[in-house]
Amino acid sequence: MAVATLSVFVVPMTDEFGWSRGQFSGAVSLGALFGLMVAPFAGRLVDRYGSGVLLSASSAVVGLCAIGLSLTSPIWSFYALYVPGRAVFSSPLELGTSIAVSNWFIRRRPMGLAYMGIIQGIGLTIFPVIVQVLIDGWGWRTAWLAVGIFTLSTGIIPVLLLMARRPEDMGLEADPEKGRRAGPTRNIAAAGAPPSASDAESNYTVRQALATRAFWMLALFSVFGFVVQAGVSLHQVPHYIDQGVPTALAALTASTFAFGQVPGGLFWSLLARRVPLRVLLSAAAVTMSVGAIGTGFSSSLSTGIPMGFLLGVGVGGIHLLLRLTWADYYGRLHLGSIRGLTLPAQIGGQAMGPIIAGVMFDSTGGYQTPFTIFGIIVAFAAVMVLAATPPGPLPQGGVTVQPAVEPVGD
């Protein structure tokens, strides 16, 4: 249900059924809006039960919806199947994976999130090409069926068997320093607060987080950033097909965009403990702006590939850095609930981007105008996010957690 993968379905499905690009994009936007409503509940479930159950249930929904899409014909059936799949993909799956990594790492959190982004980037790189091969050889219906079967076979049983909520649930400590190991948890852990691998970790409640300026600045930045991410990624393949690029080669731009998130994630993670996160978020947004505008003015792979890669580096940056910033600013204890409230900002942006680009294409006959507007939007976000300074001292009533560790000895 990833937008990059869906992009290779745009042309064959709209050509076969006579749908407009705006109608097709509307399913992405509606799915994102449903994900917006699911996010707060999903966040609380992650805090309470961990990511495993949520991720396995979400994988089941996504897999079944993809299989159903292989049988779709009227547009209402496309909406009925894609919308719930997209809602689950954009909300519970995002929360479950990123919060699991944030719960298990503190000092090494940037690298942990980067590795997660690498795996996701590899999947997003490979999937559009594989799906395009399936479409060219066996048709788009077979491609949807294959996506569904793969999701069901890999996303349920392994997740249930291998995932734990937090290291403290297993008597461990989040990324302990070399030469130290987790000791028995003390009284604060018994009260339900997880020990931190740092000297002290501030764990904001939802109410306390809402009272900080950074919360609202980051949420608004998410809206602007993901308008661009979803709007360009869905329509980049159709853009190049319209320029006369063969479909198989046009799909490479989606793969290049996804692949750019892999080195991009590593690059931003290496800087994350050296440069203020808000500065890195600004730099990632500027990178996205250049990539979006460059894509709009590109008409061949010679410029499309580097612009797609640059856009991927920027998108990989905001994905990683936003996940990292929420966890670093507000702690782990209530992270699921806080992310559950902020994820709707991201999903809202993802809902607006595709339909804005689709409607503007239908009215102008091209993507240059919407992609340029997207570049301007994210450039504004780059300036705005510099005001998202870390919250001050933890308000009264917050939870500060001390680690329980002992040196490794005889």
Image (tube, rainbow, N blue to C red):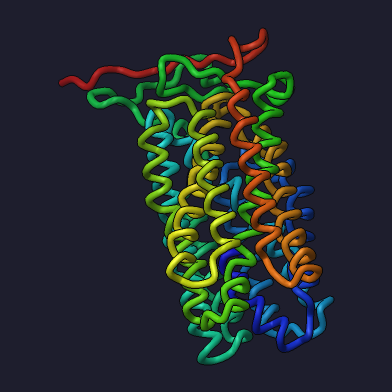
Q: Residue 97, image x and y in percent?
A: 53, 48
Q: Visible in this render: residue 391?
A: yes
Of the pair 244 and 3, the residue shown nearer to us: 244
- Residue 381 quadrant: top right
- Residue 185 quadrant: top left
Of the pair 250 and 242, the residue shown nearer to us: 242
Q: Visible in this render: residue 91?
A: no
Q: Residue furthest bottom?
A: 138
Q: Quarter of the image containing the C terminus?
A: top left
Relative vertical location of residue 349 with respect to residue 334 in this rendering, above or below: below
Q: Residue 335, image x and y in percent?
A: 60, 32
Q: Which residue lies furthest to the right in this view?
A: 76
* Count of marks placed on residues: 0
Asked if residue 178 lies left or right of residue 321, the reply is left
Image point (57%, 65%), residue name: 4
Image point (65%, 80%), residue name: 11
Of the pair 35 and 294, the residue shown nearer to us: 294
Q: Residue 66, image x and y in percent?
A: 64, 74
Asked if residue 246 lies left or right of residue 370, the reply is left
Relative vertical location of residue 293 with respect to residue 149 in this rendering, above or below: above
Asked if residue 278 lies left or right of residue 16, the reply is left
Image point (45%, 42%), residue name: 113
Q: Residue 330, image x and y in percent?
A: 59, 24
Relative vertical location of residue 45 with respect to residue 298 in this rendering, above or below: above
Q: Quarter of the image containing the N terminus?
A: bottom right
Relative vertical location of residue 18 with respect to residue 330 in this rendering, above or below: below
Image point (72%, 37%), residue name: 341
